Image (cartoon, helix red, strand yellow):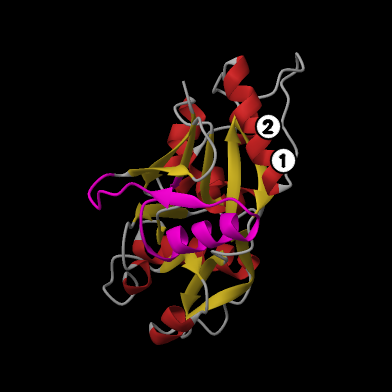
Amino acid sequence: MTIKLGIPSKGRLQDKTFEWFQARGVTLQRSDSTREYAGSVKGMEGIDLVLLSAGEIPQELAAGRIHLGVTGTDLIHERIVRWQDRVEILGLMGFGHADLVVAVPKTWVDVETLDDLDAAAAQFRARHGFRLRIATKYHNLVRDFLRAHGVADYQLVDSQGATEGTVKNLTAEAIADITSTGDTLEANHLKVLSDGLIHQSQAALVASVSAEPSTAERATLTTLLDRLGLPMRTTSEGSAC
């Protein structure tokens, strides 16, 4: 049996993940086959790299099919119900920064805060007969955030791509989406509410609580985390996981 480490399968997140491990003296290496989504840790036996999309890694961690994974904290919070009971964030990695925010059209000059949005949503429903639509792919995070701030009379509409364009395309009145620079929001004439920051995300190394490593796997995991300078998580019985 081996420790399975899930990392992003491509792009900037994968490159930054390799650099992060390398800077801590741990070299990740891909399989020789460019089509094989696998790899290993150089100089360490018993660790397999599993290359997955960042969106798949939270589910694999929660199910215990991988022991460790690199993904965004936004995806951990969004895609794992009661995530604190099912995974543990071992360390933030300092890259992949992005903010999940609520944004509205710039033309809404009287809407600057969540209280303003709540009032606008009530007026919108009274005028149009249906709830104000907020486009997002982060339904759980957004719903919890708006509930906590007393915003009502809205509906979430699913958007898996080009969320900023939904207002212009008349499929939503507002959005809740990830932004790094704000340039795309600006280009689509949207503004972030002054108190509309939902979550500040970045890449993290995350451990599965559900995975049950053998004694040999626990030893391998301890060695890896020691090299990375990270603490070893323990179960309530005191066994490492």
Of the pair 145 and 2, the residue shown nearer to us: 2
Q: Foreground residue, 147 or 192?
A: 192
Residue 31 drawn in magenta: yes
Gap in angstroms between the C-alphas marked 2 and 1 = 6 Å
Image position, residue 8 (x, y; %): 42, 52
Q: Which residues make up the magenta segment?
A: 7-36
- Label 1 element class: helix
Residue beneath disc 2: 222
Q: Name the foreground residue: 36 vs 204.
A: 36
Q: Is residue 94 left or right of residue 33?
A: right
Other-residue count near label 2 (Cα within 10 Å), few / some / many at <14 / 14–19 / ≥20: some
Q: In the image, is residue 183 above or below residue 56?
A: below
Label number found at residue 130:
none
Classify residue 25 by image quadrant: bottom right
Circle 1 Cα neighbour tier, 10 Å, few/some/many (<14 / 14–19 / ≥20): few
Q: Quadrant of the C terminus?
A: top right
Give yes or no for contact between labels 2 and 1 (Cβ–Cβ under 8 Å). yes
Count of numbered circles on the image: 2
**Which x, y percent locates residue 174?**
43, 68
Seen at 48% across and 50% down, the residue is 28
Q: Amino acid at mark 2?
A: Thr
Q: Examine the structure image and report whether residue 53 is included in the region drawn in magenta.
A: no
Residue drawn at x 50%, y 46% is 42
Pointer 1 residue? 226
SS class of the residue under badge 2?
helix
